[in-house]
Amino acid sequence: MEQANETVMIYFIVKGISDAPELQLLIFLLVLFIYLATLGGNLTMFLLIIMDHHLHTPMYFFLANLSALDISCSTISLHKALITFITGDKVVSYISCLIQMFLFLSFTCAELLILTMMGYDRYVAICNPLHYHGIMSPKACCGLAGVCWVLGCLYIMPDLLKMASVTCYTSLEINHFFCDFMPLLKLSCSDTYALQIYVITGGVFLSGVLPFILTFVSYVYIIRAILRIRSRIGRQKVFYTCSSHLTVISLLYATLISQYLRPAEYITLESNKFSSLINTTIVPILNPLIYSLKNEDVKSAFKRKFKIPKQFFLVKIS
């Protein structure tokens, strides 16, 4: 493989999901199906929330932002894999690689922050219901969502600048299906220990750990409020309103922890690729399904706007 010395980088070669020739068509069809399902599910959820005035509430406003971020993350990470399957071109310019990495990490960070805001929304609704509409006003929700999108970019910018300063690589081939941080870090022939420490203490804490802590604190208060409800049915009803959000954050954090919150020397390229594949394909598909199958408001909106037969919603997740 071509070696890279201390010089200006021009391009990388993205290896892709698999090298097996006999699996290329199957993988392409599977990835295309997953991407179209992700696009269709999240776009439907996004448009449904916009069109149905019954869903013009803070929780669904943040859910619309979550759907937009899921579409963005999947498009950024999977488009190169799909293009490679069609054209066979695995080359990506150095600048395009850094931009792809920056956008993917920024949108992922923004998604974690949006999920944090959704946890805060549930906290206000359950623990402070009398002041809910005043606290979670449309203006406040737009401001919180805007902060999430901006902070997603600002949190990742220092990591991008640090990564751009690395000019020595052992190989030009990235064993991944898109330009992600860890695969690039693995290729570096420079001493990246300081960079890893900076990423873990700075980027990872601000973009991942801090949102997790804030979400956890919200649910501590939520659970405490639920336990004060004397009626068992009442407790179940209140907890059910949080179940979709809990399921989504559990899925997302589980994949991100296995992908990023480990020292680079303990991460194999294949395990990182698998975690990324789950994070960029399965999780974005499940998000609209979880919120549609577990939410009566979304089901009702589907029936009103898309004239879905009642029998379609007989499947219910307990």
Image: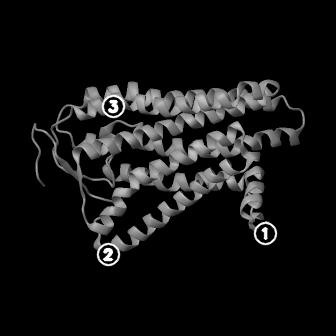
Q: Horizontal and vertical percent for residue 250?
A: 58, 43
> Which residue in the structure is indicated by mark 1?
311
Left or right of 78: which side holds 52?
right
Asked whether residue 141 appears in the rendered view, the answer is yes
Left or right of 74: which side holds 196?
left
The earlier-in-sequence mark between 1 and 2 is 2
The earlier-in-sequence mark between 2 and 3 is 2
Question: In 3D space, how far apart are the residues under numbered discs 1 and 2 (Cα atoms)?
Answer: 41 Å
Tags 1 and 3 in contact by the CB under 8 Å rule? no
Tags 2 and 3 in contact by the CB under 8 Å rule? no
Tags 1 and 2 in contact by the CB under 8 Å rule? no
> Element type at marker 3?
helix
> Element type at marker 1?
helix
User: Mark 2 or mark 3, which is nearer to you?
Assistant: 3
**Amino acid type of disc 2?**
Glu
> Which residue in the structure is indicated by mark 2?
22
Residue at 50 percent across and 36 percent down: it is 110
Q: Horizontal and vertical percent for residue 301?
A: 75, 54
Question: In 3D space, how far apart are the residues under numbered discs 1 and 3 (Cα atoms)?
Answer: 50 Å
**Amino acid type of disc 3?**
Asp
Residue at 28 percent across and 65 percent down: it is 19
Q: Horizontal and vertical percent for residue 76?
A: 40, 50
* Above or below for 191 versus 273: above
Question: Which of the 4 quarters of the picture holds residue 126?
Answer: top right
Instruction: Tell me, for residue 159, which label it has, or none.
Output: 3
Depth check, front residue: 254 or 113: 113
> Element type at marker 2?
helix
